[in-house]
């Protein structure tokens, strides 16, 4: 079942006499319960799309259905179904973890008889139960991110939007955050819509949409995207590189590349199945042998012609978006 349906979505901005197309007629769906990744460099249209789905922006044209509600026609209903974790920190550090969650629960009108139980459960799930009465200013970056995720879930949303959820965190903290996200996904029956420029983070997604210049270039599982982007690359070293290169090209009909350090490499589909035959017939001694799998970086580079750049958040735009969302939830 699809919980998000985007059909022929367009967004244009006016700059003086110019019309700037940020989103160019994109369509996609997000299945209930999946982790859906949205990848793209600055200016690709990723933020504009997410802001439309979160009811912050109005599209120029197109239709967005979220949890059976039209985003443009029923924004108040849609906001009840979504939680948002912004890229920049947005906690009140002069309040405790409990007070931050309590304040947000009041903004979303969480019933008083459910609020206490909900806050306790989320603090426990995110590993912050023992720090509930500590000021947020004393928290580490990873702890603050976990609290923001808990805050985004306080009103029982069906879809959680994570905008660069681990930016600025060390690798260990990023791993811990994803452990909590996966656990919450299962316990809360969540659909997660992820925006990230970390390729290793995108591996956590069930499906990935790559967007560039306002258009979705491709959409598939990480495994299928990598399979289509490139074959496995076998890397070898030998004491007789010149003769070995000639043998591989003549015997197997493969193109062999050699770098300055003497490492030779060639592409081969299903490298693991090919290796036994290769080793049996190779007449020279091997000093090293390795299989390099295609990565999502390879996918992005092949499909767009450039590498992905880290996101640069527009702080004023993010602050304006937060004010609009909080203001609307009070109504």
Image (cartoon, rainbow, N blue to C red):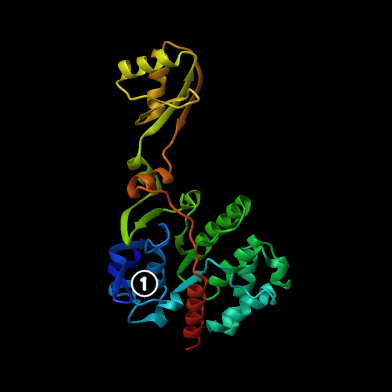
**Camera sees residue 65:** yes
Picture quadrant of residue 17: bottom left
Query: Could you tell me residue 280's position as x and y percent?
Result: 41, 14
In the image, residue 221 sits, relative to residue 24, either above or below, namely above
| Residue 114 in sight here | no
- How many dots with numbers? 1
Residue at the image point whose x is 61% and y is 56% from the top: 169
How crowded pointer 1 is (Cα within 10 Å; few <14, some 14-19, many 20+) is rated as many
Residue furthest to the front in view is 17
211 relative to 194 in the view: left or right: left
Instruction: Please identify the quadrant where the N terminus is shown.
Output: bottom left
Vertical relation: 300 (above or below) 36: above
Where in the figure is residue 229, as x and y percent of width and height? Answer: 34, 42
Q: Position of residue 265 (x, y in %)?
A: 42, 27
Left/right placement of residue 184 relative to residue 71 reads right
Provide the secondary structure element on which disc 1 rests.
strand
* Vertical arrangement, residue 295 with respect to residue 312, above or below: above
| Residue on which the image places disc 1 | 66
Question: Residue visible at 52% across and 68% down?
Answer: 85
The image position of residue 8, as x and y in percent, is 26, 67
Instruction: Give whichever of 273, 245 is nearer the camera.
Output: 245
Is 137 left or right of 107, judged from the image as shown?
right
């Amino acid at each position: 079942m699809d919980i998000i349906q985007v059909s022929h979505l367009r967004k244009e901005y006016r700059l003086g006499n110019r019309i700037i197309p940020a989103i160019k007629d994109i369509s996609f769906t997000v299945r209930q319960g999946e982790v859906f990744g949205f990848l793209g460099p600055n200016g690709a249209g990723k933020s504009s799309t997410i802001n439309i789905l979160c009811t912050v922006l109005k599209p120029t044209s197109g239709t967005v259905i979220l949890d059976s509600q039209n985003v443009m026609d029923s924004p108040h209903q849609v906001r009840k179904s979504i939680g948002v974790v912004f890229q920049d920190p947005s906690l009140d550090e002069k309040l405790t973890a409990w007070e931050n969650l309590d304040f947000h629960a009041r903004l979303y009108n969480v019933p008083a008889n459910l609020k206490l139980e909900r806050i306790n459960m989320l603090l426990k799930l995110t590993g912050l139960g023992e720090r509930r009465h500590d000021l947020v200013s004393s928290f580490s970056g990873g702890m603050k991110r976990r609290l923001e995720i808990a805050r985004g879930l306080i009103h029982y949303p069906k879809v959680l939007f994570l905008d660069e959820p681990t930016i600025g965190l060390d690798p260990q903290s990023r791993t811990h955050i994803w452990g909590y996200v996966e656990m919450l996904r299962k316990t809360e029956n969540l659909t997660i819509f992820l925006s990230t420029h970390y390729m290793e983070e995108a591996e956590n997604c069930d499906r990935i949409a790559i967007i560039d210049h306002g258009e979705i270039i491709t959409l598939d599982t990480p495994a299928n995207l990598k399979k289509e982007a490139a074959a496995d690359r076998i890397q070898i070293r030998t004491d007789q590189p010149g003769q070995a290169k000639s043998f591989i090209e003549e015997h197997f009909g493969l193109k062999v590349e050699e770098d300055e350090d003497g490492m030779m490499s060639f592409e081969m589909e299903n490298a693991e199945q090919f290796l036994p035959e290769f080793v049996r017939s190779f007449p020279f001694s091997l000093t090293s042998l390795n299989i390099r799998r295609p990565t999502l970086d390879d996918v992005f580079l092949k499909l767009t012609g450039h590498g992905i750049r880290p996101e640069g958040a527009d702080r004023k735009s993010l602050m304006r978006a937060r004010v609009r969302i909080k203001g609307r939830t009070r109504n």
